Amino acid sequence: MRDFSFDRKSIKTRLITAFIVTSLIPVILVNILSYYNTSKLVQQNVESMTRANLEQTKVSLDVWLDSYKDILFQVYTDDYIVELVDKINAGEDVANSRRLLRATLRGLFYTKDYVKSISVITESGELVFYDQLTASTTKTSWMDSISMSQEELYAAISGDNKTHLIPPGDEVVFGSNSCYLFHIGHRIIDYRKVGKQCGVVLVSIDERLLEEICASNTESGMSFIVDERGYLISCTGSEKVGCQILPPDADEEEKQSVYQEVVRETGLLNAGELSYYSVYDEKTGWNIIRVTGQEELIRGMHQQQRLLFIIIAVSLTAVLLIMTSQVTHMSGAIKGVVKVMGKAGKGDMDVRVPPDKSRPTEIETIAEEFNLMMDKLKKSVEQQKNAEIAALEAQINPHFLYNTLDTINWMAIDRDEYEISNMIATLAHILQYGISDSNGVVTIRDEVDWLRQYIFLQQTKLKNSFDCHINVEPEIMGLSIHKLLLQPFIENAILHGFEGVEGTHRLSVDMGREETCIRICIRDNGCGMPEEMVQEINAGVFRSTDDKNHIGMENAITRICMYYGEKADVQIDSRPGEGTAVLIRIPVTEDGGNV
């Protein structure tokens, strides 16, 4: 036998190399996936928080605008204002009515911050206002800044009963003060005659109100407002407020490009990759936009990645050192076991691996199993010698037995002992049937013929102490069945079922077709079995016992299960003093034979 050579360094090198390869590749993949997933998760969190903030900004915007609409409501529903406007429209005491109306508007002026002007345009074309930015009574601070004339403005507002939002126009400058104004307007309603056209009222509000509502401008992001027509309503630091920055039919790519350009022009965000989010306010028809920079997020992710690489490198180094130490110890243990195995390979059956508590558990298990295997191998070698002798004897015994029975049979015939001759011939046939291919498959006809001969011997032996009837449906005679399946049940009934029972002993075997099964019922009127034992057998539980009756039943049921699997079924029905019935079902295949 070839002598084994063992290179400890080779095994160590291979294990360490395999460890490095199998560790680094998953670590790199995990690192990449972790970085990607973390980036995606952080991005999703940022997006979720940004959208939540935009929703909150939208709610705040609606609340604030509703509070300013209250001022508007007080004006366009005030009966006194309606009366003054009617006088101006009718040309009655116009100068005094204008003065009184202006005084009334002034009284409402200071109820809210950021209100810069309250104006009324009458049906007759008169403009009456109170303007904080100018002391003039004939010219407002804002009328010339918007793109609509007074007539167009009146027509747009007076046509329905809705509140109208007018976007800012050019920047309004008076002295050292400058601002952008947006306006909310509504037609004046005379509830005594709702359909009558009286005039319209407009409240001009400083755009800085919107900037405060959207006040979340930081180094990483800023917010602004754009209406449905693409006009920039509010944006800190932008000179394009009041201008149309987008066409109404702009696509998402164009919107993103324009929004980023607007933000860059303000100089509030660093140049770099930007992302934008928007939420639509149904009440105002405005889009609230949030543009954020990605530099801080990317920088944080890179720092996390570098930290992760450092941790992985340190961990791999530490594990590599530990593994090198363990592999050195393990390779030494393997070398000792392999050395002993080499001796066994040369034919030494007495060699064993000595125990060593310092060896790894797995190698120690291999050593113990090797020792156990050697013990069994040595015992098997001795048993093999005995088996070879027994095999030679077994080749002679059947022929000797048949020849001997044949000689006795002719001796009985010479002495006119025909009953003995018949029994000997039957016994020879029974032995030959049972020994030859005992696990083979035969027809039901052959199995029944053999059972009749077996029962004949039992009846002769027991001096016809029992009656037996075998009933088989003719159409199943050609079906297949495994040999010697039924004999243990019949033997159990004859030898144990009738034991100690007086009267006529009866045994019946009924066989027939039942759908896809062969149904076999073996019934006796013997002593029966205890209920507990019947339940255990039906459940497949067999008690440990030396009773040959019990062992025979167990072996028979086990063989049926092995041959036919779950398709077979064996059920026992027995009561003490009433007898026993064994019901067996075995499957029939489509071609007529059973599986």
Image (cartoon, helix red, strand yellow):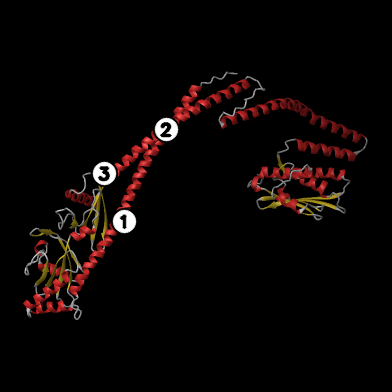
Residue nearest the observer in this picture, 491 or 535: 535
138, above or below 300, in the image: below
- Please tell me whether mark 1 sits on a helix, a strand or a loop: helix
Do the numbered discs 2 and 3 sit on residues whose CB atoms are within 8 Å?
Answer: no
| Residue at image location 31% in from the left, 43% down from the top | 300
Q: Amino acid at mark 3?
A: Glu
| Residue at image location 48% in from the left, 27% down from the top | 325
Q: Position of residue 274 (x, y in %)?
A: 24, 47
Do the numbered discs 3 and 1 sit on residues whose CB atoms are within 8 Å?
Answer: no
Residue nearest the observer in this picture, 160 or 443: 160
- Per the model, the C-alpha gap separating discs 2 and 3 is 31 Å
Observer able to see residue 226? no
Is 121 on the left or on the right of 570, as rendered? left
- Per the model, the C-alpha gap separating discs 3 and 1 is 22 Å
The image's mark for residue 316 is: 2
The image's mark for residue 295 is: 3
Question: Residue 67 occupies which quadrant of the picture?
Answer: bottom left
Q: Position of residue 317 (x, y in %)?
A: 41, 31
